[in-house]
Amino acid sequence: MSAPFRHVAVIGLGLLGSSILRAVGELLPEVETSGWDASFDVRERARVIALAPAIPDLAAEAVRGADLVILCVPVGAMGEAARTIAPGLDPKALVSDVGSSKASVAKALAEALPGQSVIPAHPVAGTEHSGPDSGFASLFRNRWCIMTPPENADEALVAKLAAFWEALGARVERMTAGHHDLVLAVTSHLPHLIAYTIVGTASDLEDVTESEVIKYSAGGFRDFTRIAASDPTMWRDVFLSNKDAVLEMLQRFSEDLTALQRAIRWDDGEKLFDLFTRTRAIRRSIIEEGQDDARADFGRADHNGAKA
Amino acid sequence: MSAPFRHVAVIGLGLLGSSILRAVGELLPEVETSGWDASFDVRERARVIALAPAIPDLAAEAVRGADLVILCVPVGAMGEAARTIAPGLDPKALVSDVGSSKASVAKALAEALPGQSVIPAHPVAGTEHSGPDSGFASLFRNRWCIMTPPENADEALVAKLAAFWEALGARVERMTAGHHDLVLAVTSHLPHLIAYTIVGTASDLEDVTESEVIKYSAGGFRDFTRIAASDPTMWRDVFLSNKDAVLEMLQRFSEDLTALQRAIRWDDGEKLFDLFTRTRAIRRSIIEEGQDDARADFGRADHNGAKA
Protein backbone atom coordinates (compact mmCIF):
# COMPACT_ATOMS: atom_id res chain seq x y z
CA MET A 1 0.00 0.00 0.00
CA SER A 2 1.39 3.39 -0.88
CA ALA A 3 1.21 6.14 1.76
CA PRO A 4 -2.04 8.15 1.64
CA PHE A 5 -0.14 11.47 1.63
CA ARG A 6 3.14 12.56 0.12
CA HIS A 7 4.13 15.32 2.55
CA VAL A 8 2.77 15.82 6.07
CA ALA A 9 3.32 19.12 7.87
CA VAL A 10 2.76 19.25 11.63
CA ILE A 11 2.00 22.60 13.29
CA GLY A 12 2.62 22.50 17.05
CA LEU A 13 5.40 20.20 18.28
CA GLY A 14 4.21 19.12 21.72
CA LEU A 15 3.24 15.61 22.84
CA LEU A 16 0.81 14.99 19.96
CA GLY A 17 2.67 16.76 17.19
CA SER A 18 6.01 15.19 18.01
CA SER A 19 4.38 11.76 18.33
CA ILE A 20 2.86 12.09 14.85
CA LEU A 21 6.24 13.01 13.38
CA ARG A 22 7.95 10.10 15.15
CA ALA A 23 5.21 7.67 14.07
CA VAL A 24 5.38 8.83 10.43
CA GLY A 25 9.17 8.54 10.50
CA GLU A 26 8.91 4.97 11.77
CA LEU A 27 5.81 3.67 9.99
CA LEU A 28 5.65 5.76 6.79
CA PRO A 29 9.33 6.50 6.14
CA GLU A 30 8.65 7.36 2.48
CA VAL A 31 6.50 10.35 3.51
CA GLU A 32 8.16 13.75 3.57
CA THR A 33 7.67 15.68 6.85
CA SER A 34 8.07 19.21 8.12
CA GLY A 35 7.18 20.89 11.38
CA TRP A 36 6.69 24.22 13.06
CA ASP A 37 5.95 25.55 16.52
CA ALA A 38 5.10 29.08 17.65
CA SER A 39 7.82 28.86 20.31
CA PHE A 40 11.41 29.55 19.26
CA ASP A 41 12.71 27.25 22.00
CA VAL A 42 10.49 24.38 20.91
CA ARG A 43 11.61 24.79 17.28
CA GLU A 44 15.24 24.74 18.38
CA ARG A 45 14.71 21.64 20.51
CA ALA A 46 12.79 19.93 17.69
CA ARG A 47 15.77 20.51 15.38
CA VAL A 48 18.20 19.08 17.96
CA ILE A 49 16.15 15.89 18.35
CA ALA A 50 15.48 15.84 14.57
CA LEU A 51 11.70 15.56 14.71
CA ALA A 52 11.53 16.44 11.01
CA PRO A 53 14.10 17.25 8.31
CA ALA A 54 12.53 20.69 7.82
CA ILE A 55 11.61 22.91 10.78
CA PRO A 56 11.73 26.45 9.35
CA ASP A 57 11.20 29.62 11.37
CA LEU A 58 8.13 30.66 9.36
CA ALA A 59 4.87 28.69 9.62
CA ALA A 60 3.95 29.43 6.01
CA GLU A 61 7.23 27.85 4.88
CA ALA A 62 6.64 24.75 7.00
CA VAL A 63 3.42 23.90 5.15
CA ARG A 64 4.67 24.72 1.63
CA GLY A 65 4.24 21.65 -0.60
CA ALA A 66 2.41 19.62 2.06
CA ASP A 67 -0.73 17.71 1.01
CA LEU A 68 -1.71 17.09 4.65
CA VAL A 69 -1.32 19.69 7.40
CA ILE A 70 -2.16 18.66 10.97
CA LEU A 71 -2.67 21.36 13.58
CA CYS A 72 -1.54 20.13 17.01
CA VAL A 73 -2.04 23.27 19.07
CA PRO A 74 -4.40 23.98 22.01
CA VAL A 75 -7.98 24.20 20.71
CA GLY A 76 -8.18 27.91 21.57
CA ALA A 77 -5.20 28.57 19.27
CA MET A 78 -6.50 26.70 16.19
CA GLY A 79 -7.90 29.76 14.40
CA GLU A 80 -4.69 31.72 14.85
CA ALA A 81 -2.53 28.77 13.76
CA ALA A 82 -4.68 28.39 10.63
CA ARG A 83 -4.29 32.07 9.76
CA THR A 84 -0.52 31.83 10.29
CA ILE A 85 -0.08 28.96 7.81
CA ALA A 86 -2.59 30.28 5.24
CA PRO A 87 -0.06 32.19 3.08
CA GLY A 88 1.98 29.02 2.38
CA LEU A 89 -0.88 26.53 2.13
CA ASP A 90 -1.46 24.61 -1.11
CA PRO A 91 -5.15 25.25 -2.03
CA LYS A 92 -5.54 21.49 -2.56
CA ALA A 93 -3.96 20.48 0.76
CA LEU A 94 -6.10 18.79 3.40
CA VAL A 95 -6.06 20.51 6.81
CA SER A 96 -6.79 18.45 9.90
CA ASP A 97 -6.10 18.71 13.63
CA VAL A 98 -5.94 16.65 16.84
CA GLY A 99 -8.01 18.88 19.15
CA SER A 100 -10.03 17.46 22.05
CA SER A 101 -13.19 19.40 21.18
CA LYS A 102 -14.49 19.42 17.64
CA ALA A 103 -17.46 21.74 17.03
CA SER A 104 -15.52 24.86 18.04
CA VAL A 105 -12.44 23.77 16.09
CA ALA A 106 -14.47 23.05 12.94
CA LYS A 107 -15.94 26.54 13.17
CA ALA A 108 -12.56 28.24 13.79
CA LEU A 109 -10.87 26.43 10.90
CA ALA A 110 -13.73 27.02 8.45
CA GLU A 111 -13.62 30.74 9.24
CA ALA A 112 -9.83 31.00 9.03
CA LEU A 113 -9.46 28.94 5.84
CA PRO A 114 -12.43 29.60 3.54
CA GLY A 115 -12.49 27.25 0.54
CA GLN A 116 -9.86 24.91 2.02
CA SER A 117 -10.62 21.19 2.63
CA VAL A 118 -10.83 20.74 6.39
CA ILE A 119 -11.52 17.42 8.18
CA PRO A 120 -11.18 17.71 11.95
CA ALA A 121 -10.03 14.63 13.85
CA HIS A 122 -9.18 13.61 17.41
CA PRO A 123 -6.89 10.72 18.27
CA VAL A 124 -7.97 9.75 21.80
CA ALA A 125 -4.47 9.22 23.13
CA GLY A 126 -2.00 11.06 25.29
CA THR A 127 -0.08 11.13 28.53
CA GLU A 128 0.28 13.71 31.30
CA HIS A 129 3.61 14.86 29.85
CA SER A 130 3.98 17.69 27.35
CA GLY A 131 6.57 19.19 25.03
CA PRO A 132 8.56 17.92 22.04
CA ASP A 133 10.54 15.37 24.09
CA SER A 134 7.45 13.65 25.46
CA GLY A 135 6.19 12.17 22.18
CA PHE A 136 6.67 8.58 21.06
CA ALA A 137 5.89 6.66 17.87
CA SER A 138 3.54 4.10 19.43
CA LEU A 139 1.23 6.64 21.12
CA PHE A 140 -1.59 5.95 18.67
CA ARG A 141 -1.28 2.17 18.49
CA ASN A 142 -4.63 0.53 19.34
CA ARG A 143 -6.15 3.91 20.27
CA TRP A 144 -9.25 5.30 18.56
CA CYS A 145 -9.05 8.29 16.24
CA ILE A 146 -12.41 10.01 15.86
CA MET A 147 -12.95 11.87 12.58
CA THR A 148 -15.68 14.51 12.37
CA PRO A 149 -15.89 15.45 8.66
CA PRO A 150 -18.31 18.23 7.76
CA GLU A 151 -21.40 17.17 5.80
CA ASN A 152 -20.03 18.30 2.45
CA ALA A 153 -16.62 16.65 2.94
CA ASP A 154 -14.85 15.01 -0.01
CA GLU A 155 -15.21 11.28 0.73
CA ALA A 156 -11.93 10.47 -1.01
CA LEU A 157 -10.14 12.79 1.40
CA VAL A 158 -11.99 11.30 4.36
CA ALA A 159 -10.80 7.84 3.27
CA LYS A 160 -7.22 9.07 2.85
CA LEU A 161 -7.16 10.65 6.30
CA ALA A 162 -8.58 7.43 7.80
CA ALA A 163 -5.87 5.43 6.01
CA PHE A 164 -3.23 7.79 7.41
CA TRP A 165 -4.35 7.23 11.02
CA GLU A 166 -4.67 3.50 10.47
CA ALA A 167 -1.10 3.47 9.18
CA LEU A 168 -0.05 5.01 12.51
CA GLY A 169 -1.73 2.12 14.32
CA ALA A 170 -5.00 3.80 15.26
CA ARG A 171 -8.54 2.51 14.83
CA VAL A 172 -10.80 5.03 13.11
CA GLU A 173 -14.37 6.00 13.96
CA ARG A 174 -16.55 8.69 12.43
CA MET A 175 -19.26 10.81 14.03
CA THR A 176 -20.61 14.35 14.06
CA ALA A 177 -18.67 17.05 15.88
CA GLY A 178 -21.59 17.51 18.27
CA HIS A 179 -21.72 13.86 19.25
CA HIS A 180 -17.94 13.75 19.64
CA ASP A 181 -18.10 16.66 22.06
CA LEU A 182 -20.74 14.92 24.17
CA VAL A 183 -18.85 11.60 24.25
CA LEU A 184 -15.53 13.19 25.11
CA ALA A 185 -17.15 15.38 27.75
CA VAL A 186 -17.80 12.22 29.74
CA THR A 187 -14.79 10.05 28.82
CA SER A 188 -12.16 12.76 29.04
CA HIS A 189 -13.20 16.30 29.97
CA LEU A 190 -15.22 15.53 33.10
CA PRO A 191 -12.53 13.15 34.45
CA HIS A 192 -9.91 15.86 34.00
CA LEU A 193 -12.06 18.52 35.64
CA ILE A 194 -12.73 16.28 38.63
CA ALA A 195 -9.10 15.31 38.97
CA TYR A 196 -8.01 18.96 38.92
CA THR A 197 -10.68 19.78 41.50
CA ILE A 198 -9.83 17.09 44.01
CA VAL A 199 -6.11 17.83 43.83
CA GLY A 200 -6.96 21.47 44.50
CA THR A 201 -9.28 20.54 47.39
CA ALA A 202 -6.63 18.33 48.99
CA SER A 203 -4.00 21.04 48.86
CA ASP A 204 -6.27 23.62 50.49
CA LEU A 205 -7.10 21.85 53.77
CA GLU A 206 -6.23 23.31 57.17
CA ASP A 207 -6.33 20.09 59.23
CA VAL A 208 -4.39 17.89 56.83
CA THR A 209 -0.97 19.11 55.69
CA GLU A 210 0.26 18.96 52.10
CA SER A 211 3.04 16.68 53.31
CA GLU A 212 0.44 14.21 54.62
CA VAL A 213 -1.49 14.34 51.37
CA ILE A 214 1.70 13.46 49.51
CA LYS A 215 2.88 10.72 51.88
CA TYR A 216 -0.42 8.84 51.96
CA SER A 217 -1.34 9.41 48.32
CA ALA A 218 -0.99 5.70 47.47
CA GLY A 219 -4.48 5.19 48.93
CA GLY A 220 -5.96 6.40 45.64
CA PHE A 221 -5.24 10.13 45.45
CA ARG A 222 -2.02 9.72 43.45
CA ASP A 223 -3.99 8.40 40.46
CA PHE A 224 -5.79 11.74 40.20
CA THR A 225 -2.56 13.72 40.36
CA ARG A 226 -1.37 12.11 37.12
CA ILE A 227 -4.31 13.49 35.18
CA ALA A 228 -4.12 16.79 37.06
CA ALA A 229 -0.52 17.17 35.83
CA SER A 230 -1.72 17.59 32.24
CA ASP A 231 -0.97 20.72 30.23
CA PRO A 232 -2.84 23.72 31.75
CA THR A 233 -3.25 25.71 28.53
CA MET A 234 -4.59 22.77 26.58
CA TRP A 235 -7.13 21.95 29.28
CA ARG A 236 -8.27 25.52 29.92
CA ASP A 237 -9.07 25.70 26.20
CA VAL A 238 -10.91 22.36 26.22
CA PHE A 239 -13.29 23.42 29.00
CA LEU A 240 -14.01 26.81 27.47
CA SER A 241 -14.53 25.39 23.96
CA ASN A 242 -16.79 22.49 25.01
CA LYS A 243 -18.66 24.40 27.69
CA ASP A 244 -22.22 23.17 27.11
CA ALA A 245 -21.42 19.45 27.07
CA VAL A 246 -19.04 19.75 30.04
CA LEU A 247 -21.61 21.64 32.11
CA GLU A 248 -24.28 19.06 31.22
CA MET A 249 -22.08 16.13 32.32
CA LEU A 250 -20.99 18.00 35.43
CA GLN A 251 -24.62 18.48 36.39
CA ARG A 252 -25.32 14.76 36.10
CA PHE A 253 -22.18 13.88 38.03
CA SER A 254 -23.15 16.29 40.82
CA GLU A 255 -26.61 14.76 41.10
CA ASP A 256 -25.14 11.26 41.34
CA LEU A 257 -22.60 12.41 43.92
CA THR A 258 -25.36 14.00 46.00
CA ALA A 259 -27.30 10.74 45.91
CA LEU A 260 -24.24 8.85 47.22
CA GLN A 261 -23.66 11.51 49.86
CA ARG A 262 -27.19 10.93 51.05
CA ALA A 263 -26.68 7.14 51.06
CA ILE A 264 -23.63 7.55 53.29
CA ARG A 265 -25.42 9.95 55.62
CA TRP A 266 -28.38 7.56 56.01
CA ASP A 267 -26.28 4.37 56.25
CA ASP A 268 -27.72 2.95 53.04
CA GLY A 269 -25.02 0.30 52.54
CA GLU A 270 -27.07 -1.55 49.96
CA LYS A 271 -27.12 1.41 47.59
CA LEU A 272 -23.36 1.81 47.89
CA PHE A 273 -22.73 -1.89 47.41
CA ASP A 274 -24.94 -2.05 44.31
CA LEU A 275 -23.11 0.80 42.60
CA PHE A 276 -19.66 -0.52 43.58
CA THR A 277 -20.52 -3.89 42.07
CA ARG A 278 -21.82 -2.41 38.84
CA THR A 279 -18.72 -0.29 38.22
CA ARG A 280 -16.45 -3.37 38.25
CA ALA A 281 -18.01 -4.63 35.03
CA ILE A 282 -17.05 -1.47 33.12
CA ARG A 283 -13.41 -1.96 34.06
CA ARG A 284 -13.50 -5.51 32.73
CA SER A 285 -14.99 -4.33 29.41
CA ILE A 286 -12.31 -1.66 29.00
CA ILE A 287 -9.58 -4.24 29.49
CA GLU A 288 -11.27 -6.68 27.10
CA GLU A 289 -11.52 -3.93 24.50
CA GLY A 290 -7.75 -3.40 24.78
CA GLN A 291 -8.03 0.12 26.20
CA ASP A 292 -6.16 -0.47 29.46
CA ASP A 293 -3.51 -2.55 31.15
CA ALA A 294 -5.01 -5.55 32.97
CA ARG A 295 -2.17 -5.75 35.48
CA ALA A 296 -2.84 -4.60 39.05
CA ASP A 297 -2.30 -0.88 39.51
CA PHE A 298 -1.63 -0.41 35.75
CA GLY A 299 1.51 -2.52 36.34
CA ARG A 300 3.27 0.50 37.76
CA ALA A 301 6.46 0.25 39.72
CA ASP A 302 7.23 2.22 42.83
CA HIS A 303 10.30 4.34 43.39
CA ASN A 304 12.36 1.35 44.52
CA GLY A 305 11.40 -0.75 41.53
CA ALA A 306 8.96 -2.90 43.50
CA LYS A 307 5.79 -4.13 41.87
CA ALA A 308 3.17 -2.11 43.71
CA MET B 1 18.08 -8.32 64.29
CA SER B 2 15.74 -11.04 65.47
CA ALA B 3 12.12 -10.93 64.27
CA PRO B 4 9.84 -8.82 66.49
CA PHE B 5 7.25 -11.63 66.72
CA ARG B 6 7.56 -15.40 66.89
CA HIS B 7 4.23 -16.42 65.32
CA VAL B 8 1.98 -14.20 63.15
CA ALA B 9 -1.62 -15.22 62.51
CA VAL B 10 -3.51 -13.52 59.67
CA ILE B 11 -7.31 -13.46 59.74
CA GLY B 12 -8.79 -12.70 56.30
CA LEU B 13 -6.81 -13.94 53.28
CA GLY B 14 -7.62 -11.37 50.59
CA LEU B 15 -5.20 -8.93 48.93
CA LEU B 16 -3.81 -7.55 52.21
CA GLY B 17 -3.80 -10.73 54.28
CA SER B 18 -2.20 -12.83 51.57
CA SER B 19 0.39 -10.10 50.92
CA ILE B 20 1.38 -10.06 54.60
CA LEU B 21 1.83 -13.84 54.60
CA ARG B 22 3.89 -13.73 51.41
CA ALA B 23 6.01 -10.86 52.73
CA VAL B 24 6.65 -12.61 56.06
CA GLY B 25 7.54 -15.80 54.20
CA GLU B 26 10.06 -13.92 52.10
CA LEU B 27 11.45 -11.35 54.54
CA LEU B 28 11.02 -13.00 57.96
CA PRO B 29 11.29 -16.71 57.10
CA GLU B 30 12.04 -17.65 60.73
CA VAL B 31 8.58 -16.44 61.82
CA GLU B 32 5.84 -19.05 62.14
CA THR B 33 2.62 -18.20 60.27
CA SER B 34 -0.98 -19.33 60.21
CA GLY B 35 -4.05 -18.04 58.44
CA TRP B 36 -7.81 -18.20 58.35
CA ASP B 37 -10.66 -16.86 56.25
CA ALA B 38 -14.40 -16.94 56.87
CA SER B 39 -14.91 -18.35 53.35
CA PHE B 40 -14.44 -22.08 52.86
CA ASP B 41 -13.39 -21.52 49.22
CA VAL B 42 -10.78 -18.95 50.19
CA ARG B 43 -9.32 -21.28 52.85
CA GLU B 44 -9.13 -24.08 50.27
CA ARG B 45 -7.46 -21.83 47.73
CA ALA B 46 -5.03 -20.51 50.36
CA ARG B 47 -3.98 -24.09 51.15
CA VAL B 48 -3.46 -24.87 47.44
CA ILE B 49 -1.18 -21.84 46.97
CA ALA B 50 0.41 -22.51 50.41
CA LEU B 51 -0.06 -19.05 51.88
CA ALA B 52 0.79 -20.44 55.34
CA PRO B 53 1.72 -23.87 56.69
CA ALA B 54 -1.37 -23.84 58.94
CA ILE B 55 -4.81 -22.83 57.63
CA PRO B 56 -7.25 -24.63 59.94
CA ASP B 57 -11.02 -24.57 59.55
CA LEU B 58 -11.59 -22.91 62.92
CA ALA B 59 -10.54 -19.30 63.52
CA ALA B 60 -9.74 -19.96 67.18
CA GLU B 61 -7.27 -22.65 66.13
CA ALA B 62 -5.59 -20.37 63.61
CA VAL B 63 -4.60 -17.86 66.30
CA ARG B 64 -3.52 -20.42 68.94
CA GLY B 65 0.09 -19.75 69.98
CA ALA B 66 0.36 -16.54 67.91
CA ASP B 67 1.94 -13.49 69.57
CA LEU B 68 0.70 -11.20 66.77
CA VAL B 69 -2.73 -11.51 65.18
CA ILE B 70 -3.56 -9.22 62.24
CA LEU B 71 -7.18 -8.83 61.18
CA CYS B 72 -7.41 -8.25 57.41
CA VAL B 73 -11.19 -8.20 56.97
CA PRO B 74 -13.54 -5.39 55.83
CA VAL B 75 -13.77 -2.76 58.59
CA GLY B 76 -17.44 -3.58 59.18
CA ALA B 77 -16.49 -7.19 59.97
CA MET B 78 -13.70 -6.44 62.49
CA GLY B 79 -15.83 -6.86 65.61
CA GLU B 80 -17.19 -10.21 64.47
CA ALA B 81 -13.75 -11.45 63.41
CA ALA B 82 -12.39 -10.48 66.85
CA ARG B 83 -15.17 -12.39 68.62
CA THR B 84 -14.55 -15.43 66.42
CA ILE B 85 -10.86 -15.66 67.31
CA ALA B 86 -11.31 -14.77 71.01
CA PRO B 87 -11.57 -18.37 72.31
CA GLY B 88 -8.11 -19.28 70.92
CA LEU B 89 -6.33 -16.00 71.60
CA ASP B 90 -3.29 -15.92 73.93
CA PRO B 91 -4.10 -13.22 76.56
CA LYS B 92 -0.63 -11.74 75.94
CA ALA B 93 -0.94 -11.68 72.13
CA LEU B 94 -1.02 -8.34 70.34
CA VAL B 95 -4.02 -7.84 68.06
CA SER B 96 -3.71 -5.44 65.12
CA ASP B 97 -5.46 -4.89 61.81
CA VAL B 98 -5.05 -3.25 58.38
CA GLY B 99 -8.40 -1.43 58.13
CA SER B 100 -8.80 1.81 56.16
CA SER B 101 -10.68 3.63 58.93
CA LYS B 102 -9.35 3.57 62.46
CA ALA B 103 -11.66 5.17 65.06
CA SER B 104 -14.49 2.73 64.39
CA VAL B 105 -12.13 -0.26 64.27
CA ALA B 106 -10.46 0.73 67.55
CA LYS B 107 -13.88 0.89 69.19
CA ALA B 108 -15.05 -2.45 67.72
CA LEU B 109 -11.88 -4.29 68.76
CA ALA B 110 -11.81 -2.80 72.27
CA GLU B 111 -15.41 -3.92 72.79
CA ALA B 112 -14.89 -7.40 71.34
CA LEU B 113 -11.59 -8.09 73.15
CA PRO B 114 -11.68 -6.46 76.59
CA GLY B 115 -8.30 -6.62 78.37
CA GLN B 116 -6.43 -7.61 75.18
CA SER B 117 -3.58 -5.48 73.80
CA VAL B 118 -4.88 -3.88 70.60
CA ILE B 119 -2.88 -1.53 68.34
CA PRO B 120 -4.74 -0.65 65.14
CA ALA B 121 -2.66 0.03 62.03
CA HIS B 122 -3.21 0.83 58.36
CA PRO B 123 -0.66 0.10 55.67
CA VAL B 124 -1.56 2.58 52.89
CA ALA B 125 -1.08 0.14 50.04
CA GLY B 126 -3.20 -1.95 47.74
CA THR B 127 -4.37 -2.56 44.21
CA GLU B 128 -7.81 -2.86 42.61
CA HIS B 129 -7.58 -6.66 42.72
CA SER B 130 -8.89 -8.79 45.56
CA GLY B 131 -8.74 -12.36 46.82
CA PRO B 132 -5.92 -14.67 47.99
CA ASP B 133 -4.25 -14.83 44.56
CA SER B 134 -3.89 -11.06 44.23
CA GLY B 135 -1.36 -10.56 47.04
CA PHE B 136 2.39 -10.11 46.57
CA ALA B 137 5.34 -9.82 48.93
CA SER B 138 6.48 -6.35 47.85
CA LEU B 139 3.09 -4.65 48.33
CA PHE B 140 4.29 -2.75 51.40
CA ARG B 141 7.74 -1.75 50.16
CA ASN B 142 8.22 2.01 50.39
CA ARG B 143 4.58 2.48 51.42
CA TRP B 144 3.57 4.14 54.68
CA CYS B 145 2.00 2.17 57.51
CA ILE B 146 0.07 4.40 59.92
CA MET B 147 -0.20 3.13 63.49
CA THR B 148 -2.91 4.53 65.75
CA PRO B 149 -2.13 3.14 69.22
CA PRO B 150 -4.59 4.02 71.98
CA GLU B 151 -3.33 6.45 74.65
CA ASN B 152 -2.59 3.74 77.19
CA ALA B 153 -0.76 1.48 74.71
CA ASP B 154 2.29 -0.51 75.85
CA GLU B 155 5.18 1.35 74.16
CA ALA B 156 7.23 -1.83 73.89
CA LEU B 157 4.45 -3.42 71.84
CA VAL B 158 4.11 -0.27 69.71
CA ALA B 159 7.83 -0.49 68.93
CA LYS B 160 7.58 -4.20 68.10
CA LEU B 161 4.68 -3.63 65.72
CA ALA B 162 6.58 -0.79 64.04
CA ALA B 163 9.61 -3.07 63.67
CA PHE B 164 7.38 -5.73 62.08
CA TRP B 165 6.08 -3.35 59.41
CA GLU B 166 9.53 -1.97 58.76
CA ALA B 167 10.78 -5.52 58.24
CA LEU B 168 8.11 -5.83 55.52
CA GLY B 169 9.56 -2.75 53.80
CA ALA B 170 7.09 -0.15 55.03
CA ARG B 171 7.81 3.25 56.55
CA VAL B 172 5.95 3.78 59.81
CA GLU B 173 4.08 6.85 61.03
CA ARG B 174 2.02 7.33 64.17
CA MET B 175 -1.04 9.50 64.75
CA THR B 176 -4.40 9.48 66.50
CA ALA B 177 -7.22 7.45 65.00
CA GLY B 178 -9.22 10.65 64.49
CA HIS B 179 -6.46 12.36 62.52
CA HIS B 180 -5.86 9.20 60.47
CA ASP B 181 -9.52 9.16 59.49
CA LEU B 182 -9.40 12.77 58.34
CA VAL B 183 -6.18 12.29 56.33
CA LEU B 184 -7.38 9.12 54.65
CA ALA B 185 -10.77 10.65 53.91
CA VAL B 186 -8.98 12.98 51.49
CA THR B 187 -6.13 10.78 50.20
CA SER B 188 -8.15 7.62 49.74
CA HIS B 189 -11.86 7.60 50.62
CA LEU B 190 -12.94 10.70 48.65
CA PRO B 191 -10.96 9.61 45.53
CA HIS B 192 -12.68 6.22 45.64
CA LEU B 193 -16.13 7.75 46.12
CA ILE B 194 -15.61 10.11 43.20
CA ALA B 195 -14.27 7.35 40.97
CA TYR B 196 -17.26 5.12 41.75
CA THR B 197 -19.60 8.05 41.06
CA ILE B 198 -18.20 9.06 37.69
CA VAL B 199 -18.11 5.48 36.44
CA GLY B 200 -21.75 5.20 37.46
CA THR B 201 -22.63 8.52 35.80
CA ALA B 202 -20.95 7.48 32.55
CA SER B 203 -22.82 4.19 32.38
CA ASP B 204 -26.22 5.84 32.91
CA LEU B 205 -26.26 8.27 29.94
CA GLU B 206 -28.89 8.13 27.22
CA ASP B 207 -27.01 10.00 24.49
CA VAL B 208 -23.67 8.26 24.89
CA THR B 209 -23.61 4.45 24.73
CA GLU B 210 -21.67 2.24 27.12
CA SER B 211 -19.72 0.98 24.12
CA GLU B 212 -18.61 4.54 23.36
CA VAL B 213 -17.61 5.14 26.97
CA ILE B 214 -15.44 2.01 26.80
CA LYS B 215 -13.89 2.71 23.39
CA TYR B 216 -12.87 6.27 24.17
CA SER B 217 -11.90 5.69 27.80
CA ALA B 218 -8.21 6.39 27.10
CA GLY B 219 -9.02 10.10 27.27
CA GLY B 220 -8.88 9.90 31.08
CA PHE B 221 -11.94 7.91 32.14
CA ARG B 222 -10.12 4.56 32.25
CA ASP B 223 -7.97 5.75 35.16
CA PHE B 224 -11.10 6.09 37.30
CA THR B 225 -12.33 2.63 36.38
CA ARG B 226 -9.28 1.06 38.00
CA ILE B 227 -10.14 2.52 41.40
CA ALA B 228 -13.85 1.84 40.83
CA ALA B 229 -13.00 -1.85 40.37
CA SER B 230 -11.96 -2.13 44.03
CA ASP B 231 -13.70 -4.54 46.40
CA PRO B 232 -17.34 -3.43 46.95
CA THR B 233 -17.73 -4.83 50.47
CA MET B 234 -14.51 -3.29 51.72
CA TRP B 235 -15.44 0.12 50.35
CA ARG B 236 -19.05 0.11 51.49
CA ASP B 237 -17.73 -0.48 55.00
CA VAL B 238 -15.12 2.28 54.71
CA PHE B 239 -17.69 4.93 53.81
CA LEU B 240 -20.13 3.88 56.52
CA SER B 241 -17.41 3.66 59.19
CA ASN B 242 -15.73 6.98 58.38
CA LYS B 243 -18.92 8.85 57.63
CA ASP B 244 -18.20 12.21 59.29
CA ALA B 245 -14.78 12.78 57.73
CA VAL B 246 -15.94 11.58 54.30
CA LEU B 247 -18.99 13.87 54.34
CA GLU B 248 -16.80 16.79 55.43
CA MET B 249 -14.32 16.25 52.57
CA LEU B 250 -17.15 15.69 50.12
CA GLN B 251 -18.65 19.03 51.09
CA ARG B 252 -15.37 20.82 50.42
CA PHE B 253 -14.91 19.03 47.11
CA SER B 254 -18.44 19.97 46.02
CA GLU B 255 -17.82 23.62 46.83
CA ASP B 256 -14.60 23.62 44.80
CA LEU B 257 -16.31 21.87 41.90
CA THR B 258 -19.12 24.42 41.93
CA ALA B 259 -16.55 27.22 41.77
CA LEU B 260 -14.95 25.62 38.70
CA GLN B 261 -18.35 25.06 37.13
CA ARG B 262 -19.00 28.77 37.53
CA ALA B 263 -15.59 29.63 36.03
CA ILE B 264 -16.40 27.54 32.95
CA ARG B 265 -19.88 29.06 32.61
CA TRP B 266 -18.47 32.60 32.79
CA ASP B 267 -15.40 31.94 30.59
CA ASP B 268 -12.98 32.63 33.43
CA GLY B 269 -9.96 31.03 31.76
CA GLU B 270 -7.54 32.60 34.20
CA LYS B 271 -9.09 30.85 37.20
CA LEU B 272 -8.92 27.50 35.40
CA PHE B 273 -5.33 28.06 34.28
CA ASP B 274 -4.21 29.03 37.79
CA LEU B 275 -5.62 25.87 39.36
CA PHE B 276 -4.31 23.62 36.59
CA THR B 277 -0.82 25.05 37.07
CA ARG B 278 -0.91 24.62 40.85
CA THR B 279 -1.94 20.95 40.70
CA ARG B 280 1.13 20.02 38.63
CA ALA B 281 3.42 20.76 41.58
CA ILE B 282 1.66 18.20 43.81
CA ARG B 283 2.31 15.47 41.25
CA ARG B 284 6.01 16.34 41.22
CA SER B 285 6.18 16.12 45.03
CA ILE B 286 4.49 12.71 45.06
CA ILE B 287 7.02 11.38 42.58
CA GLU B 288 9.94 12.91 44.51
CA GLU B 289 8.63 11.31 47.70
CA GLY B 290 8.71 7.92 45.95
CA GLN B 291 4.94 7.42 46.06
CA ASP B 292 4.34 7.07 42.32
CA ASP B 293 5.87 6.04 39.05
CA ALA B 294 7.43 9.00 37.21
CA ARG B 295 6.99 7.41 33.78
CA ALA B 296 4.29 8.78 31.48
CA ASP B 297 0.90 7.16 32.11
CA PHE B 298 2.30 5.16 35.07
CA GLY B 299 4.42 3.34 32.49
CA ARG B 300 1.46 1.24 31.51
CA ALA B 301 1.34 -0.84 28.38
CA ASP B 302 -1.64 -1.18 26.10
CA HIS B 303 -3.18 -4.43 25.00
CA ASN B 304 -0.70 -4.84 22.15
CA GLY B 305 2.30 -4.27 24.37
CA ALA B 306 2.90 -0.75 23.10
CA LYS B 307 4.18 1.93 25.42
CA ALA B 308 1.14 4.18 25.77
Image (spheres, coloured by chain):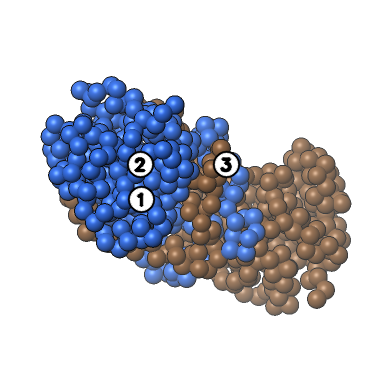
Chain colours: A blue, B brown
Question: Do the numbered discs 3 and 2 sit on residues whose CB atoms are within 8 Å?
Answer: no
The amino acid marked with disc number 2 is: Glu
Residue drawn at (45%, 49%), measured in percent from left and top?
A: A136
10 Å neighbourhood of mark 3: few (<14), some, or many (≥20)?
few
Residue drawn at (14%, 40%), measured in percent from left and top?
A: A112
Is A144 or B77 nearer to us in this picture? A144
The amino acid marked with disc number 1 is: Pro
The tag on residue B305 is 3
Q: Marks 3 and 1, Cα distance to the nearest angstrom? A: 29 Å
Residue B116 image offset from top left, x and y in percent: 74, 65
User: Could you confirm whether marks 2 and 1 are on the same chain?
Assistant: yes
Q: Secondary structure at mark 3?
A: loop
Q: Residue furthest bottom?
A: B155
The tag on residue A53 is 1
Q: Secondary structure at mark 2?
A: strand
- Considering only vertical position in the picture, is B126 above or below A204? above
Question: Do the numbered discs 2 and 1 sit on residues whose CB atoms are within 8 Å?
Answer: yes
